[in-house]
Amino acid sequence: MTTLILARHAKAEKPSPEVPDHERQLTVEGTTAAGILAGKLSSAGIGIDLALVSSATRSRSTWKGMASAFPAARVHIEDSLYETTVGSIHRMLSELPDGTGNVIVVGHAPVLSATTAWLAGPGSDTPSLKRIAHGLPTGSAAVLEFEGEWSSLGQSSAVLTSIVHSAAQY
């Protein structure tokens, strides 16, 4: 069984005309949330072999706050994850080499929610599907599992097992 985690960056500072969107920083709350999210994923027994991280400052900072929980993970900063589509994320994942292992994508709304909904198939957790329909909150992650190689990942081919959030409730 292979695990894919689609994680939305933690809480970032509000948009401002003085700061380009790509360069927005995490808030103090967001920095804390990234570590909490990593701890929850790790405590659930989820390992990460590869992190694909948007080049936006808030996504890179989210991964930085998570990285110590997954010290063996290889990291690729991906410019294309900043503004992307479900199809582009699918292509990126389906082109991963055999044996890549578990992958986390750290990126943005609304594309991560849309990608989760597109991938989630039969057997997916109903409350998690309902949460995805309302959008993945900041500092949260959709956990999907599937059988086979990354090249076999497609629409409705994974099972959404849970949504993990950095806050106690959301």
Image (cartoon, rainbow, N blue to C red):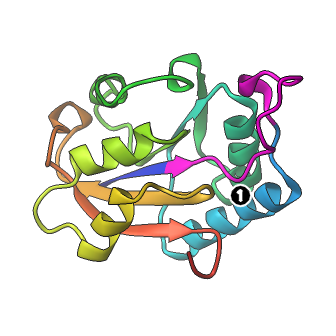
Residue nearer the viewer, 143 or 170:
170
Residue name at image x 67 percent, y 38 percent: 59
Residue 86 locus on image (x, y percent): 32, 31
Most distant residue in the left direction: 122
Q: Is residue 65 left or right of residue 81?
A: right
Residue 165 against residue 154 in the figure, above or below? below
Q: Is residue 93 left or right of residue 56?
A: left
Residue 40 against residue 152 in the figure, above or below? below
Residue nearer the viewer, 106 or 66:
106
Q: Main secondary structure of the magenta part?
A: loop
- Within the image, what quadrant is residue 66 found in? bottom right
Most distant residue in the bottom direction: 168
- Label 1: which residue? 34
Q: Is residue 1 visible?
A: no
Residue 20 against residue 149 in the figure, above or below? above
Residue 141 locus on image (x, y percent): 49, 58
Residue name at image x 68 percent, y 52 percent: 10
Residue name at image x 60 percent, y 30 percent: 54
Q: Is residue 20 left or right of residue 44?
A: right
- Within the image, what quadrant is residue 90 found in? top left
Residue nearer the viewer, 112 or 41:
112
Chain part drawn in magenta: 7-24
Magenta span includes 134? no
Q: Is residue 76 left or right of residue 97?
A: right
Residue 29 locus on image (x, y percent): 82, 62
Q: Amino acid at mark 1?
A: Ala
Looking at the figure, which quarter contains the C terminus? bottom right
